[in-house]
Image: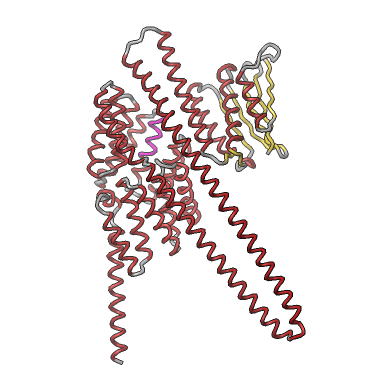
Amino acid sequence: MIKKLLQYVVLIAVVNANAQQKSAIDDLNNISFALKLEKASSLDDDFLKNAQEAHKINYVLGEAESYNNLSLVYYFQGKYEKDFKYSLMAIGLYELVGDKEKMAAIYAETGYRMKSRNIKKAIQYMQKGKRIAEQYRFQKPLLSIYNNYGVLKEMQQEYDSALFFYNKGLQLKEKINDSLGIPYSLNNIAGIYVIRNKFEEAKLLYDRAIDIRNKLKDEIGITENYTYYGDLYAKQKQHEKAILWYQKALQKALQFHYTDLIGNNYKMISENYEAINNQKEALYHFKKYTQYKDSLLNKDTNSKIAELEVKFETNKKEKLLAESKNQLLQREIEVKNARYFIIGITLLALFTGLIGYLVFRQQKLKNRQQEKEFELKSAIALIEKQNELQEQRLSISRDLHDNIGAQLTFIISSVDNIKYAFDIQNEKLDHKLQNISNFAKATIIELRDTIWAMNSNEITFEDLQIRILNFLEKAKAAKEEIDFKFTIDKSLYDLKLNAVFGMNVYRVMQEAINNALKYANPNQIAIDVTKIDDKVSVKISDNGVGFDFKTIEKGNGLNNMQKRIESIGGVFSMQSEVGTGTTISILLSI
């Protein structure tokens, strides 16, 4: 009796001790977001010990939360490999305990943090978190998901989509009076206004955001807002004002070791000093920016992150494979039990026939299993080949962007500096310099389109529509009087084209619109994509001046369009009448 009583007392003591440990673990995990950012440079050891303590007492959720916080502080330290590693560990533990809400939040946050290193992967993780949160109607994760998804859309220059998600996030936050989150949405909406030269509207939103952050004493948020004021004045070419705001932001960013903002502010200070022809300060700050840029785009870090991701996905596949084998083993046991039962009731008379049946069945199961193993090996080999091709594409596109893109940007900057530095009276020379700058800018756009196609295994008509609409948005800025229309059959939205096929269709659309803008003087341009049986019809029409086929020679542009469509097995045709307009028709087999 005494022995049992002692055991009971010990058990109660252990339970109480575990409860106290859980409470201590939760207290550290639940410190405010602002404090996590402020102390990011020194909290990594605390959260790692917290995870170890949670693991000792088998407190899985506490361990997951500790890894989640650990990944956050490593992100703000600029240690992206460790950030990604602990994010994946947290995802695995949340999945183990079935916490869908935390899974949605961390998938989306992982995507957001990858935005500067791998935008395609960033969108994949963000969309995964968004799908889970919307499926289960988790309001808390959606407060940040909509805002951060808008950032990714803005980085892809899809400004209408970005503004849509920024406003969607702001409505949610204002509904529950989320004072910490509202400034993020206000600043992002203001950023779109700055891009569109709506400076007064942008400043009102920036002022509202920084007022909230000053009341909250959100030092990191205040630092970001200082940077946004710098962006606002830089866009208005008030470079001295911009430099003052960037320097204020840089001072705070250095204080809190906020790597992203440090690098960004060094870069912007350099660019603004260059704009006012202070080459000494421009060079000094550019060198500082380069140091931080190297930490953001470290190739070894990115390759380790990719390796961690592969291991994470492989572990999930191995777990599924183990579950399949267990199920197969269970089925085999059930079959054996059934066989024994049948043997027992049929006695010796059916023994010979039953043995034959079981041998046949066993062989069939074996053959089926071999077929499945072969299919699995083939699928793994295909995935490895696709991954290898994707790595090569990413490497080439990165080289194009970093080398050719940087050189073209240098040309544009140099031409602009020459024009600003010298009072050029020669109109021909000024016109020639402007042509060089415009050609370099157009080449950068072409380069981005090429990189986009290279990084896409498949392109849908929805992708083409978004790309063309972005192109048309820029065209509107030059010719506001033109009414652009783009309609597409809904059944074609998800039709997938290979990258070469999709890029050729996009280039032909782009060339047709450019020709109409240059030569036709229209007030309407329309693109219609429809499905006709097993083919897709694309028509680009304008109501411009038109031309007579008998009196005009086909130029390189028309010949190139025809060759592009014929190279992908399509049919190209064109109709035009003087005074009525021109229609280009493309018929594609799908």
Q: Is residue 163 visible?
A: no
Q: Main secondary structure of the magenta part?
A: helix
Eyeballing the image, is 411 above or below 343?
A: above
Name the residue at 27% across, 34% down. 288
- Comparing 441 with 300, the one in front is 300
Eyeballing the image, is 372 above or below 492?
A: below
Name the residue at 31% across, 63% down. 52
- Comparing 316 with 416, the one in front is 316
In the image, taking residue 332 as reference, residue 304 lies left or right, namely: left
In the image, taking residue 209 as reference, residue 478 lies left or right, namely: right
Tally of marks: 0
Residue 349, image x, y percentages: 77, 85
Eyeballing the image, is 87 above or below 406?
A: below
Residue 361, image x, y percentages: 70, 70
Quadrant of the drawing holding the N terminus: bottom left
Residue 196, image x, y percentages: 41, 29
Eyeballing the image, is 219 above or below 574?
A: below
- Comparing 570 with 256, the one in front is 570
In the image, taking residue 53 as reference, residue 567 lies left or right, namely: right
Name the residue at 43% across, 37% down. 155
Name the residue at 65% across, 60% down. 371
Examine the structure image and report whether residue 189 is included in the region drawn in magenta: yes
Magenta stretch bounds: 187-195
